[in-house]
Amino acid sequence: QVQLEESGGGLVQAGGSLTLSCSAFGPVDSSYSMAWFRQAPGKEREFVAAMREPNYTYIEDSVKGRFTISRDNAKKTVRLQMSSLKPEDTAVYYCAVDSKVVPTATRAAAWDYWGQGTQVTVSG
């Protein structure tokens, strides 16, 4: 069974940086797509970034140039490096993995496995 654990969330000032990590447990290998979504209070869960080997990466326009997604297949981890953070980036950030979808699958319903989420708060 696949399990995901996010870490690295916290409180940061606008303009600051934060790196989120997600560790996968279970039968997750390099063929899986790995993604980050986020959900702000009162809003739907929205796509942030995803990647699939080799180097197939898709990043949502509002974070492009500020966020970077990377993965370490040996450690079964995916990271989201966030810089130039804005108050509107405040949300719970979720890690997701799936063996069938491609990184352009921006609908949350398309992804099978989810972590519990980690809170990111950007103060303005």
Image (tube, rainbow, N blue to C red):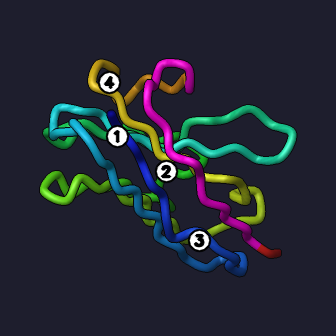
Q: Are marks 1 and 2 in contact (CB under 8 Å)?
A: no
| Range covered by the magenta-colored residues | 108-122
Q: Is residue 123 left or right of residue 86?
A: right
Label 3: element kind: loop
User: What numbered label is drawn on residue 102?
Assistant: 4
Q: CA distance from mark 4 to mark 1?
A: 9 Å
On the image, the x and y values in percent for residue 115 come to: 50, 45
Q: Is residue 40 left or right of residue 17?
A: right
**In the image, what residue occupies the spot 31% across and 40% down?**
51
Q: CA distance from mark 4 to mark 2?
A: 18 Å
Give the residue at mark 1: 34
Q: CA distance from mark 1 to mark 2?
A: 17 Å
Which quadrant of the view contains residue 100? top left
Give the number of the mark in front: 4 or 1: 1
Residue type at the position of mark 3: Ser
Q: Are marks 4 and 3 in contact (CB under 8 Å)?
A: no
The quarter in which the C terminus is drawn is bottom right
User: What numbered label is drawn on residue 84?
Assistant: 3
Vertical comparison of 56 with 9: above or below? above
Vertical comparison of 110 with 15: above or below? above
Residue type at the position of mark 4: Val
Label 2: element kind: loop
On the image, the x and y values in percent for residue 33 come to: 30, 34
Viewer-proximal residue among 96 and 83? 96
Residue type at the position of mark 1: Met
Give the number of the mark in front: 1 or 3: 1
